[in-house]
Image (spheres, helix red, strand yellow):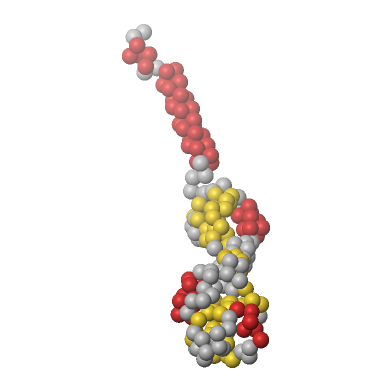
Amino acid sequence: MSFVRFLLTKTFLKQLGLALLVAVAFVFVLLFYLRMSTNHNQQIQVPDLAKMTLDEADLALTELDLRWEILDTTNYNPDYPKQSVIEQLPKAGSMVKEKRTIYLTVNRSDYRSLPIPNVVGRTRRQAEPTLVSLGFKIGKVTYRPYIAKDEVLQLRHNGELIEPGAMLQKTAVIDLVLGDGKGNLRMGREADSSTDSDSDG
């Protein structure tokens, strides 16, 4: 029997058809496996973690089979709870695959402390911008008898005298004690016995 005639026999055609069926089945199984192993078209919506504590964020992400990692700890933001999520990447609403890592930026626990600059002896016009640029706030301004008008005699916080170099929390309110320019050359602690006179200026 010639080779060409053999190719046309029922036995060969039956074997060929069976081989084709096996090959097609193998391709379908392989495609199904690849689809499952790569999570093809399986998408998870990233939840909004803003203002959540790390424990709350961990619970929300774990339920969705997502992972998380702290990317950064930013400066303290009073609009967010301490140690809460300020930013996230990918952003809320993004579609990701399971086990994707969500990177979190966390709020500091509080404002950091800064050294008080030495502005005693400077004018109010010089002192105020220096303090404000560091993040401090200017509170009550009082005047005491002194030869130079608007010269800084003392810095106070919550009624207590604070010395240059002392550490004070950022955004703390600092009260200024200034000279009134009316001629009495007294400064520092000696001025404590004088009578305060509040001023809006």
Camera-nearest residue between 106 and 123? 123
Q: Is residue 151 above or below residue 6?
A: below
Q: Is residue 182 above or below residue 100?
A: below
Q: Is residue 13 above or below residue 54?
A: above
The x and y percentages for residue 13 are 41, 21
Camera-nearest residue between 39 and 122? 122
Residue in the image at 57% along x and 59% along y:
106
Can residue 32 be seen? no
40 relative to 3 in the view: left or right: right
Residue in the image at 43% along x and 22% along y:
16
Can residue 178 be seen? yes
Residue 53: quarter of image: bottom right
Q: Quadrant of the N terminus?
A: top left
The x and y percentages for residue 140 are 57, 84
The x and y percentages for residue 177 are 57, 82
Report the number of discs: 0
Camera-nearest residue between 172 and 92? 172
Residue in the image at 59% along x and 62% along y:
108
The x and y percentages for residue 189 are 64, 79
Residue in the image at 48% along x and 37% along y:
31
